[in-house]
């Protein structure tokens, strides 16, 4: 496999010279692999898509490496089946888990020549210095994210490059994780025959896929409801203010149903998906679900109202955590004009928007990764459960646009497979004609989102298995 100067494998390129980026979402309930490239309009064309049920992952952490490897290989086999011409070598991986923590720091440097404009390398050095921050033994710094800068007496500067001053500093959001948990992800990916190009915090990957720069400026909370955890990222005034991992997700709801109604786990999951709602008041009091009896036993009648009550109780608990974290950083409904954006598999639960607005007092909506996808793809790829994978591809393109010299020029012709295209004879969609975007222009879109977070720091963060819930 080709290697670059940093020892990281190089990506495959398509015939246009744009790299083919692969996002790998290792979740509690599913593992998804999506390969994509940007077209001439700056939209993502999906070249390969595969998923498999996840085994060996609990609450976002890889506990059984062998089972996780098998699940990754099944997802890759499914992706290869969708497009035999696709060659996957390296991946961007999204991660999360209970072990993830964050802290706020402040740092500055005194410049040698204050008459010279501030350059990129000085900002990189300032960020790198924060990696020396003391953290508990057994943890490691995953990412150092600058929030706002200050130059001498000037505060709240978004980008200090080009300014003059004696001292430049910034406030930072530092994300940490358990060292062993991070190593397990690298091991599972490496033993699956892949190389980890970079690791990204799951809620940040999801956020880049479902929100715009206007959302960042208005103030928004992204809640990614996965299988094992729900991940929160709060943005205000164009910067990342807070991240948190809430230790409950779709699997917890399924287990509550299993225990509360005395059914098997598979039955609980099926009832949640087919008949579940987040508001008990919206469930019909006289509606029942018939569950086949075991070993000749009589069938069991399950009240739809009782099912909804169990789901509402657990979802309300998750949303109470969201309210707590938002208040902890001094924000409220008036500050978050962009509202709460719900994404991940759990966001598809019926009446969840209404429950979210009731519990938090903040407007809510579902976040779909449609904005960045070319319009001719099948609807399956536009589901919230794939927001993390789409965000990881955007992360890869941000790396490419800012560190192109680390990428080679290996070309390979790969077309969008028919199986991933929408049947345009039924629902014709026309791409809006726009001037072709040059590489300088490409750096100004939402992909600049990743500029808010230091591009080159490789160490982890992911989502939780997104089990589809409706």
Image: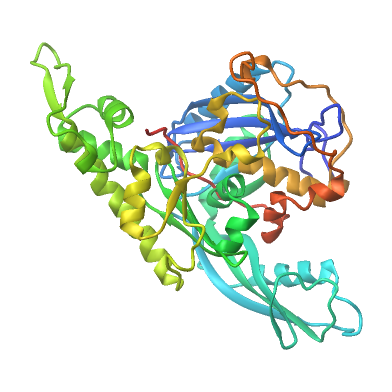
Q: Where does the C terminus fall, quadrant-wise?
A: top left
Q: What count of labels does the image hold?
A: 0
Instruction: Give the residue furthest to the left.
Output: 298
Q: Is residue 426 left or right of residue 299?
A: right
The reply to whether residue 6 is in sight is no
Residue 93 lies, in percent from the top left, at 61, 42
From the viewer's side, name the closer residue of 104 and 381: 381
Q: Where does the N terminus fall, quadrant-wise?
A: top right
Residue 276, quarter of picture: top left
Q: Is residue 204 left or right of residue 295?
A: right
The reply to whether residue 130 is in sight is yes
Q: How is the image coloured?
A: rainbow
Q: Residue at x 58, y 20 (%)?
A: 78
Instruction: Give the residue furthest to the top.
Output: 296
Vertical placement of residue 372 versus 286, above or below: below
Vertical placement of residue 237 versus 257, above or below: below
Residue 444 lies, in percent from the top left, at 77, 53
Residue 252 lies, in percent from the top left, at 31, 42
Residue 456 lies, in percent from the top left, at 73, 55
Residue 149, quarter of picture: bottom right
From the viewer's side, name the closer residue of 307 and 114: 307
């Amino acid at each position: 496999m080709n290697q670059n100067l940093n020892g990281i494998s190089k990506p495959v390129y398509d015939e246009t010279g744009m790299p083919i980026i692969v996002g790998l979402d290792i979740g509690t309930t599913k593992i998804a692999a999506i390969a994509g490239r940007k077209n001439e309009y700056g939209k993502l064309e999906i070249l390969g898509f595969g998923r498999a049920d996840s085994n060996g992952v609990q609450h976002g952490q890889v506990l059984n490496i062998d089972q996780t490897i098998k699940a990754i290989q099944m997802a890759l086999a499914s992706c290869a089946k969708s497009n035999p011409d696709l060659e996957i070598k390296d991946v961007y991986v999204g991660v999360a888990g209970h072990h993830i923590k964050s802290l706020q720091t402040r740092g500055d440097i005194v410049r040698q020549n204050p008459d010279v404009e501030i350059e990129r390398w000085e900002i990189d050095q300032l960020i790198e210095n924060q990696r020396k921050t003391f953290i508990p033994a057994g943890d490691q710094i995953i990412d150092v994210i600058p929030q706002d800068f200050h130059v001498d007496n000037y505060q709240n500067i978004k980008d200090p490059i080009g300014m003059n001053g004696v001292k430049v500093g910034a406030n930072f959001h530092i994300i940490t994780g358990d060292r062993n948990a991070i190593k397990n992800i690298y091991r599972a990916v490496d033993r699956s025959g892949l190389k980890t190009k970079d690791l990204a915090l799951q809620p940040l990957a999801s956020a880049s896929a479902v929100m715009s720069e206007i959302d960042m400026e208005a103030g928004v909370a992204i809640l990614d409801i996965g299988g094992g955890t729900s991940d929160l990222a709060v943005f205000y005034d164009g910067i990342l203010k807070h991240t948190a991992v809430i230790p409950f997700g779709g699997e917890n709801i399924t287990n509550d149903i299993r225990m509360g109604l005395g059914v098997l786990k598979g039955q609980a999951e099926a009832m949640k998906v087919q008949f579940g709602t987040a508001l008990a008041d919206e469930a019909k009091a006289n509606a029942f679900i018939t569950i086949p009896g075991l070993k000749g036993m009589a069938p069991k009648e399950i009240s739809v109202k009782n099912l909804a009550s169990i789901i509402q109780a657990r979802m309300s608990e998750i949303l109470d955590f969201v309210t707590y974290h938002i208040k902890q950083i001094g924000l409220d409904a008036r500050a978050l004009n962009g509202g709460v954006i719900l994404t991940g598999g759990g966001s598809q639960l019926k009446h969840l928007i209404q429950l979210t607005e009731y519990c938090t007092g903040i407007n809510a909506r579902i976040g779909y990764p449609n904005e960045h996808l070319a319009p001719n793809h099948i609807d399956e790829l536009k589901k919230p459960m794939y927001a993390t994978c789409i965000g990881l591809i955007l992360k890869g393109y941000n790396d490419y646009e800012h560190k192109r010299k680390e990428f080679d020029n290996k070309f390979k012709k790969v077309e969008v497979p028919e199986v991933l295209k929408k049947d345009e004879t039924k629902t014709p969609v026309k791409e809006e004609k726009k001037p072709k975007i040059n590489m300088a222009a490409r750096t100004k879109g939402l992909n600049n989102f990743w500029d808010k977070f230091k591009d080159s720091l490789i160490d982890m963060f992911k989502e939780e298995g997104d089990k589809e819930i409706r």
